[in-house]
Image (cartoon, rainbow, N blue to C red):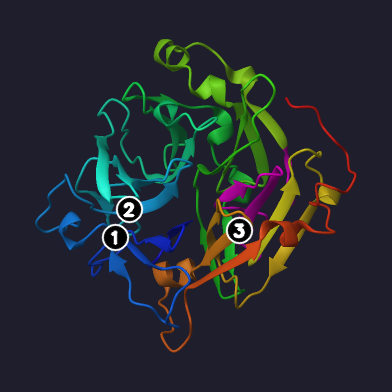
Amino acid sequence: MPLGIDAYENRFFISIPRWKTGTPATLVWLDLPSRDKSPLLRPYPNWNFHTTPTNPDCTKFMSVFRVHVDDCGRLWAIDAGMVNTTSTPNLVCPPKIVVFDLTTDRVLLNYPIPQDIVKEDSLYTSILVDIRNGQCEDAHAYITDTWRSALWVFSWAKKRSWRASNYLMLPNPHACEYNFHNQLDYQWTDGIFGTALGLVNSQGDRLVYFHPMSSYAEFSVRASVLQNETIWREGINVNTQFKQVGERGTNSQSSTSGIDRDGVLFYTLVNQDAVGCWDTNKVLVPNNIHHVDQSQVFFSFPNDLKVDKAVDQGVWVLANNLPLYLYTGLDYSQVNVRILRASTKNAAKDTACDPTRRGGNIAWG
């Protein structure tokens, strides 16, 4: 079951965690644009880099959840190391970051998460990379620990990492009920899941927006707070630095999100089979949010979202019928996985998310 996506020049990457048995490769790629209606998925970087739960080599890929292409042409993959995630979770290999140079497809980094950071039942699900002004050696990665409601922060320059947590990363108990097309009711208690980088301000800082999966709210914290290793190593209280930005409304659970160059945040709406948007320069209230698109067919459980780095910037969405796959079974006579793209400017044009439209503006907090 494909879960994560990202695009880079003429290639498109798809992660396929080992939810169940029968996944030969956990990170694959295809041509962009595709030459075929149903293209073959090719293992990345090659077959030899993929191991199996029965004969594990933990220097290789075990179960990649999501990927991120950074501003320096590097592909970052978060390998959770866990198989059979929703039935009998088995941590076969330590969770790790693997980074590739997309020019040569060579491994630049293979970094297991230190044991003091991995908690019992940790599940690392998404990765976001923060780079300023082309400073490739000063990158920071933010990785979500969804089951233990925390962020793992990694410094490329230091080759060190630390755990950052706050109660706003916890799930909202009132948002743990899900429904799939009035066919299936289920409960998830997932914590922090979606993260997105705000625009850099005049002081060289930026907000990191985040939300738990089981929540209706959006939150933020300054990147400088997350990147300050001393704060987290010494347990300094920075709770006041975490802010609630606003709420999306009821039934608005969201998995992933991304922000374009104009500061427009796009996000999935898994219970509504929709993609929403909000201009981060405006107050997050119902009048300032908009459904970019909604379809029970084309956006059937929109699970991952990426804003690419093309000149004509695009927002990509993967919809994958995940609840059916996990709990009842897929109908293989139907299309179960779709990947769609729209221009970010066209998606926001003449809507409440359009940066050129006036709204309730907010100061950078």
Q: Which mark is residue 315?
A: 3
Give the alpha-carbon distance from disc 2 to disc 1, as whole Å.
6 Å
Is residue 244 or residue 281 the one in the foreground? 281
Q: Quadrant of the N terminus?
A: bottom left
Q: Quadrant of residue 37?
A: bottom left
Q: Which residue is mark 2?
A: 64
> What range is drawn magenta here?
246-272
Amino acid on which disc 1 is placed:
Thr
Q: Residues within 10 Å of mark 2 (few under 14, many from 20)?
A: many
Is residue 203 or residue 319 the one in the foreground? 203
Indicate the secondary structure of the residue bearing disc 1: loop
Q: Position of residue 11 (x, y in %)?
A: 41, 62
Amino acid on which disc 3 is placed:
Val
Pointer 2 or 1: first along the chain: 1
Identify the residue at image location x=71%, y=44%: 262
Residues under numbered marks 1 and 3 in contact, where contact means CB atoms less than 8 Å apart: no
Residues under numbered marks 2 and 1 in contact, where contact means CB atoms less than 8 Å apart: yes
Q: Is residue 102 magenta?
A: no
Would residue 61 be seen by someone viewing this image from the given angle? yes
Is residue 93 or residue 42 the one in the foreground? 42
Is residue 239 or residue 59 the one in the foreground? 59
Indicate the secondary structure of the residue bearing disc 3: strand
Q: Which residue is mark 1?
A: 26
